[in-house]
Image: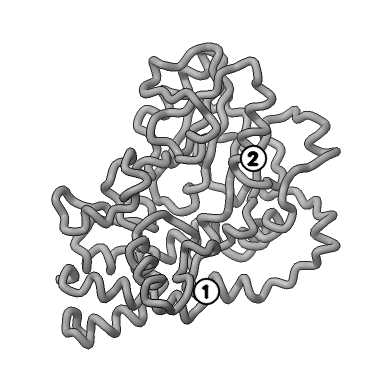
Amino acid sequence: MLDKVYDQLKWIIARNELENKKKRGSFLYQRPASDNIFDIHKRVTGLNLGLRGVNLPQTIKWLETLTPNLFEINQFNKNFDTTKLPNIGVHWQEYNCEPMSNTVHTILQWMNTHKQREPVIFDKEFWYYRKIIDKTIHSVEDLQSNNCLVISVPFMNGLKCKKDMNEILKKCVELDIPVALDIIWLPLTNEKIALTNTECIEVITHSITKMLPLAGIKGGFVFWRKPIDDTHNIYPLGNSLSFWIAQEFLEHFDYFHIEKSLRPMQTKWCDLFDIKTHSCCYVGELPKNHWLQKENLYKKKYDEFDGTLFSLIPYYENDQMLTKFLQDKKIIKH
């Protein structure tokens, strides 16, 4: 059982992050600060918290081959090929695709166009939205005609599409409520999402920082419903570099490349931890009273979320060394 060696696995991961930059996240808290035993222990205790773009060897190798011409990218104006995007019920041709600065700034920009409305989110939505939006609602019946709604698909809590999502969109159409849709998790799920009543969706944000390990660069692409304001073209606010990288990725790989690549390892590690696989490839689902319950994804700061998800990202990134360790311990066979 891995519960006997779980702490050892985490120490191996933290040491690997210290020694190998290709095992680390973009930000300082996603690696040990130094080789001091206290700094490594600090990383070990926080290893299970939060999700980030996974460092897959194939992805890193591809990123390292990119040779961006920054002068040309500064003037980059290539049309986005929406045929590479999945069919989730959104009519992509009805939108103008642009580079995005980051998700929160785009949402703030959109909210500014609806200053006469009250922005709302559903409870257990992305924690940063709760920093910029005061009103939280709990059911579709709480929607009011003077609202504008920000919502993620898959939804932040649980990383699955809300069961009543189409009912929510229908209500928004009926009450003429504009909607901002955040689809950052979409390329990482195999859930079959089929949205209806999407005519109320005015803006769709799609950061690439969970799909690719580029959180330090930020950005991605954003879809604004046509016709768009001229200022979008005259004074673009987006990150052209991340937009270019996203285009290059979709030209070289399938939209669901990361998700498909991780499924075998997800099955492997979920079996080893005796937890359930999840539609989002980055996590496993903890059964009730599982020994890893206190190691859930939302421990400590995010206790308001459902504590049923367990991050598998560190185990994917260190799969080879951890597997060797478990073989040496005779926990798994060669």
Q: Residues within 10 Å of mark 1 (few under 14, many from 20)?
A: few
List x then y, in percent, for residue 159: 38, 45
1 or 2: tag closer to the N-terminus = 1
The amino acid beneath tag 1 is Gln
Query: In this orientation, which residue lies closer to the viewer: 163 or 7?
Result: 7
Residue 45 figure quarter: bottom left
Reading the image, the residue beneath label 2 is: 105
Task: Please identify the quadrant where the N terminus is shown.
Answer: bottom left
List x then y, in percent, for residue 32: 44, 71
Secondary structure at badge 1 equals helix
For residue 307, side relative to residue 257 (left or right) = left
- 1 or 2: mark nearer the eye: 2
At a point 49% along the width and 33% down the height, the residue shown is 151
The amino acid beneath tag 2 is His
Q: Is residue 128 above or below residue 189?
A: above
List x then y, in percent, for residue 237: 75, 43
Alpha carbon distance from label 1 to label 2: 31 Å
At a point 33% along the width and 38% down the height, the residue shown is 304
At a point 79% along the width and 42% down the height, the residue shown is 236
User: Which label sits on residue 256?
Assistant: none
Is residue 94 visible in the rendered image? The answer is no
Reading the image, the residue beneath label 1 is: 58
Q: How is the image coloured?
A: one colour
